[in-house]
Amino acid sequence: MRYLIQHPEPIGIERDLLAAGDVVRVARAVEAAGWDGIAFTEHPAPGYRWLAEGGGHQTLDPFVALGAVAAVTERIRLLTYLSVVPYRNPLLLAKAAATVDLLSGGRFILGVGTGYLKSEFFALGVDFDERNALFDEALDVLPLHWSGERFSYDGRHFNARDLIARPSPARPIPIWIGGNARITRRRVATRAQGWMPMSGPPEMATTTRTAHLSGLDEIAAAIRELKEMAGPRADEIDVMVLYTDDSILTPRADVARHRDALAEIRDAGATWVSFAWDFSTEAETLAFVEGFAEHYLGDERV
């Protein structure tokens, strides 16, 4: 199993996002410690109340941030966790993804979702009710753009005639889709290379407009259903599960219990585990990065 950390993103508006870790220093530490990946998410137009009332978090532009990470690392995978597909023309999304992939030597994973913040859709001039149609349209366009071959496509709001995008990635960029709905798993089974289920309390599922998966048993059942839908592609699909037990923030405590929990996640069908914590200082971030590696990323990793 592989392990990924999301760069810390502070809740609210008062703190400085980069106080939790300079992007370059954190990325170098993540790679040096033996982690397998790092991720950034996005909210380009968050509402004031969403942030100020403690429901939202700050972000960087994930493609720019991952470009910086690509320049100072050699091994770890680089993930958007996740990019909201309907916010962008799919040709611009494809070019941003291809650029990060090329600059990183083929280490980029495009993690995507349909989005849920209505106010952000309005601010960006995107019809919230079209988000699923725009998402499926992008799944059509992305591989055409990355192919390096001539193509045309009639979109909802654009007409691409006889285009060719160069330079093209050396291999198809993996697409991982986030969300719990059955339509999400159907998309993964037929058109993507990874699934990122969302775990947490029912209130979070309501906020993010997705189905609620209450625990690992339900996630395991959903993974089994996904693999059945994927058929011959089942073994090609990665699954990344978020680790939510915050007692692991003291990595040296309860190591045996956490190793058992990680093994249960693996046995449920996951191939990756992600960690997303709201650290306040760079020292806290680096202490977790290094402490987790010391106790969980050695020769006996789960």
Image (tube, rainbow, N blue to C red):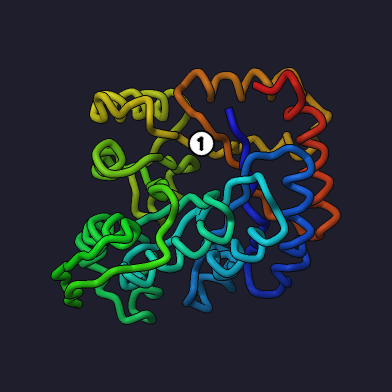
Quadrant holding the N terminus: top right
| Residue at x 33% of width, y 43% of height | 192
Residue 190 picture quarter? top left
Coordinates of residue 118 in the picture (x, y in percent)? 35, 70
Position of residue 126 relative to residue 232, above or below, is below
Instruction: Decide if residue 255 is in sight here.
Output: yes
Give the residue at mark 1: 241
Instruction: Decide if residue 116 is in sight here.
Output: no
Coordinates of residue 32 in the picture (x, y in percent)? 78, 44
Coordinates of residue 184 in the picture (x, y in percent)? 29, 44
Coordinates of residue 57 in the picture (x, y in percent)? 58, 65
| Residue at x 73% of width, y 35% of height | 247
| Residue at x 21% of width, y 67% of height | 130
Q: Amino acid at mark 1?
A: Val
Q: Is residue 180 left or right of residue 72?
A: left
Q: Nearer the viewer, residue 50 or 130?
A: 130
Judging from the image, what secondary structure is the residue with disc 1 in?
strand
Disc 1 crowd rating (10 Å Cα; few below 14, some 14-19, many 20+) is many
Q: Nearer the viewer, residue 250 or 237?
A: 237
